[in-house]
Amino acid sequence: MRRLAPVDDPALLVGVTTGDDAAVYRLDDDRALVVTADFITPVVDDARTWGRVAAANAVSDVYAMGGRPLLALNLVGWNSEELSIDLLAEVLLGAQDVASEGGFVIAGGHTVDDPEPKFGLAVVGEAAPDRLLVNTGFRPGDALVLTKPLGIGVITTAIKAGVAPDDVVDGALASMTRLNAEAARVALASGATGATDITGFGLLGHLGRAVQESGVDAEIDVGAVPLLEGARGLAEAGSMPGGSRRNLAWVDERLDHGGHAEIDVLLLADAQTSGGLVFGAAPAAAHEALDRLGESGHTASVIGRLVEGDGRIRLA
């Protein structure tokens, strides 16, 4: 990516240089387009549920920027020799379920033949140019709010191995299919300017990039980070995805482990699918945000704070 020529357009408010969740393009003083694309391989066996998870995962990038989704296109890789069109229809119906809940339109898409099925969305949303949530917006003195528990990567690894209990699977699916729409509204209402969603690079990876871009340090209270039910036990039993270890390796040179056990640190790096948001807000506003998130059914927590620094994370 560094070999690409930088884009020189004053209307491009957010591009590739800061590692943000989506691109943002100003239309006028009051409106900006938020544009993203994301797709995943199956994380569950049920086709409609996979469609819901993949769609929620894709549209999350718009919410993470403080935007509202308007329009989406399906992105499909499908093994037409082995998988039926009826099964694909179920995937698309799952995505439509999410679009209906999120108040946006899916207007077609594109399909390619692929030996390994993949599904996601290209999404266009809108946001106010002066009310964006961005990687460069984390501020010293703010508290860090995480809006969903971690552990999705561990649990989906256990699902693939056939060792995840049904109640643990149900909890993970409920988390993955919960949209980040309300979390984004709460973040904006709390005065947040910095936010990112927690997906494939885990909490440590996504927050690590954000504090680098913002020029601050993060202090994380490991005991305050919520985990999905059953995630820790499955991790201890060996259901740790390889991606989580790669995430930790990427951030490790800027990470102070604080003497915590490896399993605790790896869970913070756990690769999420359709994870929550992490955002910064003044301490009083952060605790008010927890109340609002709790009222809407979120398992959210204040997990630490931001201090002056140069892009490091310290675990406490």
Image: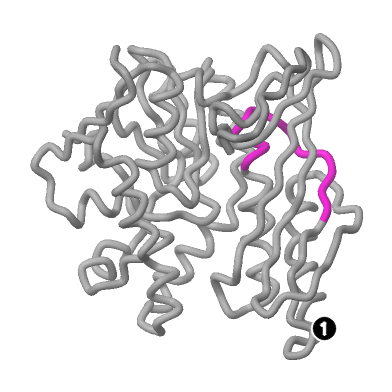
The image quadrant where one finds the C terminus is top left
**Does residue 60 appear to the left or right of 252 in the view shown?**
right
Which quadrant would residue 158 be assigned to in this image? Answer: bottom left
Range of the magenta residues?
61-73
Q: Is residue 120 magenta?
A: no
Does residue 245 appear left or right of residue 275 in this picture?
Answer: left
68 in magenta: yes
- Which residue type carries mark 1? Asp
Residue drawn at 58 percent across, 22 percent down: 188
Identify the image quadrant of the N terminus: top right
**Count of marks overlaid on the render:** 1
| Mark 1 crowd level (few <14, some 14–19, many ≥20, 10 Å Cα) | few
- At x 63%, y 40%, the residue is 61
According to the image, label 1 marks what residue? 86
Look at the numbered disc 1 and give the secondary structure of its residue. helix
Q: Which residue is at 50% across, 18% downward?
A: 137
Where does residue 144 sit, x and y in percent of width and height? 37, 27
